[in-house]
Amino acid sequence: MNIESISQFVVQYWAIALIVSLAFAFFGYYLLRVSLALIGFAGGVYLGQYLWLQLINRYNLQITQSNEKMIHLGVIMIVAFLSTALFISFYKLAIFIAGFVAGGAVAYYVYNWVLLAFKVSVKLHPGLIGLGVFVTFGIIVGLVILKSERKAVGTVLATIGALVASYSIMVPLSIYFKVEPINLLHDLTDGNHIFMLTIFILIFLSLSIISVKLQIGKNKKRNNNKGESED
């Protein structure tokens, strides 16, 4: 699973991705366990697909065509179920993993965008440096979320939802910028489509501000009301 494959998935199912991401953005904190379950299930689906491909390619399994689809689906669903159960059962660990993946992915995306936009060439172990950026920022975001769980979780879910929603919105809009949807990620990060990138950033910032204010604002109000009732 990488940013490119996620991008292609969003482009292919942009309407569904938009609805789900908006739900994360505006209601992710209030549906936290559901959100974690969805993250665990999605991660399990990707992991199950990866394991299936490894089994087929590495061990050259001889499976009849009539049984292949059933076994394929079974492997994916079993892994997805275990991943979902893990995320729900180990709540703190799930929050850290979600923060680690989200923080690392965003940092890696920004890192690649800077390299492409400013045409920076990394000659010394570029893959290792990219991995270092992912791991470093992933750990930082994961620890921050654990330390300030209530605010951080709402903010992270709102930001991730806003990011995916903004990208989903850009898919149908790409035709107005004379860009093929399949190349949207590349064209947003190549530094040659500044106006389109500006629109994307404005949509992302607007959704982020509104969604974070909604989730964190409601959370503060609920906590204040709870404190008053206890007094």
Image (spheres, rainbow, N blue to C red):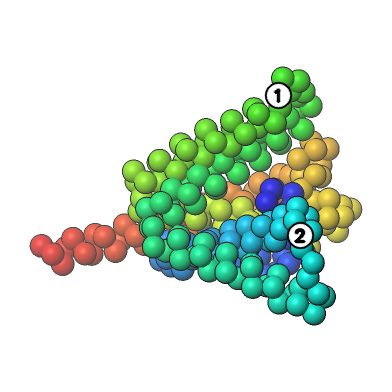
Percent coordinates x, y for residue 164 in the rendering = 63, 56
Percent coordinates x, y for residue 95 in the rendering = 43, 52
Residue at 76% over, 60% down: 56
Furthest toward the left, the residue is 231
Q: Amino acid at mark 1?
A: His
Left or right relative to 69: residue 176: right
| Residue at disc 1, secondary structure | loop
Residue at 76% over, 32% down: 117
Percent coordinates x, y for residue 225 in the rendering = 23, 64
Residue hosting label 1: 125
Q: Amino acid at mark 2?
A: Ile
Bin the neighbour count of mark 2 within 10 Å (Cα to Cα): few under 14, some 14-19, many 20 and up.
Answer: few
Left or right relative to 142: residue 25: right
Q: Quadrant of the C terminus?
A: bottom left
Residue at 48% over, 49% down: 97
Residue hosting label 2: 56
Residue at 66% over, 40% down: 109
| Residue at disc 2, secondary structure | helix
Give the camera-side residue of 9 and 153. 9
The earlier-in-sequence mark between 1 and 2 is 2
Can residue 107 be seen from the camera position used here? yes
Task: Classify residue 17 by image quadrant.
Answer: bottom right
Furthest toward the bottom, the residue is 66
